[in-house]
Image (cartoon, rainbow, N blue to C red):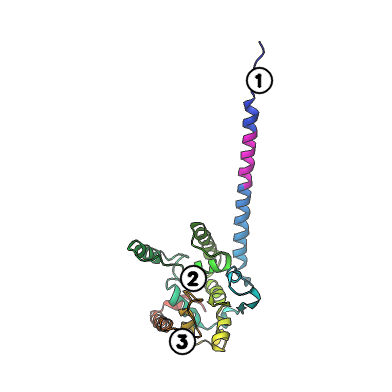
Amino acid sequence: MARRRDNTRPTRSISSRIGSFVARTLVAVLVLWLGVTAGAVALLRYVDPPVTAMMFQQPVPLREVQHHWVERRAIAVAAAHAVIAAEDQRFLTHNGFDLESIERALEDYRAGEGLRGASTITQQVAKNLFLWPGRSFVRKGVEAYFTLLIEAFWTKERTLEVYLNVAELGTGVFGVEAAARRFFRTSAGELTAEQAALLAAVLPSPRRYSVEQPSDYVRGRRDWVLGQMRSLDTDGHFNALAW
């Protein structure tokens, strides 16, 4: 009696080959992604980015965006101190994530208050350079990935230099040099402590708050930033910053 042919093995073999091909493709794509992104971040430690993802998301055409890159030595130290005081007072000591601020934000949220941000300067640089707007877990995960890369490849001084050059300080106005020219008719290197504090005061929402016509809230926040700058300077907090 003739043996019955088994037709199931070829089917399993084809399925196995397809699965193996898909797995190899996914691994190759992942390795390529890791290599390209890590390489880009490493390169940007030395090369100044001419444009950022955030600039493409402006309500004004890219050609109308005001942005003038300047080197760290051409930025007043008051500007560096102001953004640290306003946005991320543990910037010089954390590794990209301020866990204390994150925990406090979660506690406030659990207590019924609105969910507020706890992004560090490093996270904001990652968002401004590479990402799209939104609050999804996928986007936050990608932001965390780029934050880790920046912390791994850049110095704190480089991170702060990039932040001061790419932060949005008004609709279509990016960086302290463009903001100094637009709002104060001066350069980033000539900014006073009061002017730097006013720029830092609008950073939470630069399209809502105005440097040119500051509200009482913005003036109050400017004064708070100035107080924090003096306090941190007195405590020697900024001594670790080579500016």
Q: Position of residue 123 (x, y in %)?
A: 50, 66
- What residue is shown with label 1? 5
* Residue type pointed to by label 1: Arg
Mark 1 closeness class: few <14, some 14–19, many ≥20 residues within 10 Å:
few
Q: Which residue is mark 2?
A: 121
Which residue in the protein does label 3 denote? 194
- Within the magenta stretch, is there residue 13? no
Circle nearer the N terminus (1, 2) = 1
Q: Which residues are magenta?
A: 14-25
**How crowded is the residue under tag 3: few (<14 C-alpha within 10 Å), some, or many (20+)?**
some
Foreground: disc 1 or disc 2: 1
On screen, 44 above or below 224?
above
Q: Quadrant of residue 93?
A: bottom left
> How packed is label 2: few (under 14 Cα within 10 Å), some, or many (20 or more)?
many
Give how far apart the Cα atoms at labels 2 and 3 are: 21 Å
Q: Residue furthest left?
A: 111
Q: What amino acid does circle 2 point to?
A: Ile
* Residue 103 picture location, percent across and down: 37, 63
Secondary structure mostly taken by the magenta-highlighted segment of the chain: helix
Q: Is residue 20 magenta?
A: yes
On screen, residue 150 versus residue 104, left or right, reads right
